[in-house]
Image: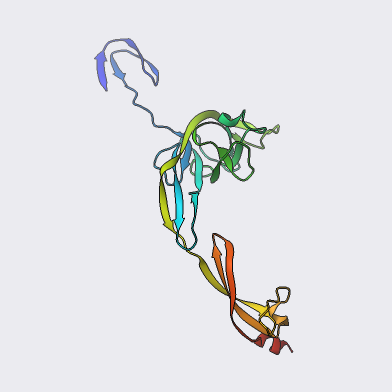
Amino acid sequence: MKHKNLCLLVSTIASTVFACGIASISYAEDKLEDVGIQFRNSDSLNKKIVKIIKYVGTCPGSGRESIIGRFVHNEVPTKKKRRVRIYNETLADASEEIPYTDRKYKKKNKSSKISFDFGSNHKESKFVIKPGTNKLSYQIYNGKYGKSNMEVVEEGNFLVNVEKSPTVTEIQRDIEYKAKVICVDKNGNAQPYKSLDDCKYAGSQKVGTCNGATVSSHLTNIWRNDRYKKKK
């Protein structure tokens, strides 16, 4: 802060000030981004390096981490029933319907969670982006979108940069085994359409799953079903 004994017109980036006598001159500093997407596991607003994964072990495979984030605006307060609609302007010409998402904007200057996916066409469940830089536009609004009671509180645009990691992260993943009791006949054949209350015999089935899919199952033992005996 500098002081000068004179009448002057001070123009700064932030404001224009008329002063006489002692003039206070404020020099604007670089302003941090206050609007955009705060991605999970990212320290920088509007930036994300997506981890590429190679699964090793008895359940091998490949994939990437989920891309999750929230829209934030440090200058526009959240409010009950307030929402934000975000469009991907970069993909406007690549899709029949421009990709967008519409989220609640009611707590702590953040929207509800947004799930992202790479692509070019609009998806209902995820907000579509492309690897690299994406120009996103937004409207924070009250009321119902496109209806007569819609009131736009703030609108604008910003850039986000989402890149795939150039390195691959190896993660151990093995088949998961769980045991469950099923209805069987005396020879150990599964009776999937019967409840345990209607079965003379029950069996313990060991089921192996890999990434949610069943890859193995076998019967470990069979016994007379007490639940059936009690019913009779």
What is the image's colouring?
rainbow
Q: Quadrant of the C terminus?
A: bottom right
Would you say residue 112 is visible in this rendering? no
15 is higher (above) or lower (below) than 214: above
Q: Quadrant of residue 171?
A: bottom left
187 is higher (above) or lower (below) than 152: below
Q: Quadrant of the N terminus?
A: top left
Total labels drawn:
0
Q: Position of residue 223 (x, y in %)?
A: 63, 86
Foreground: 178 or 226?
A: 178
Foreground: 135 or 26?
A: 135
Q: Position of residue 51 (x, y in %)?
A: 44, 46
Residue at figure coordinates x 38%, y 28% from the top left? 31
Would you say residue 209 is visible in this rendering? yes
Foreground: 82 or 173?
A: 173
Q: Quadrant of residue 203?
A: bottom right
230 relative position to 11: left or right? right
Residue at figure coordinates x 48%, y 43% from the top left? 108
178 relative position to 49: left or right? right
Q: Position of residue 57 (x, y in %)?
A: 45, 61
90 relative position to 75: left or right? right
Residue at figure coordinates x 50%, y 45% from the top left? 67
126 is higher (above) or lower (below) than 209: above
Foreground: 125 or 167?
A: 167
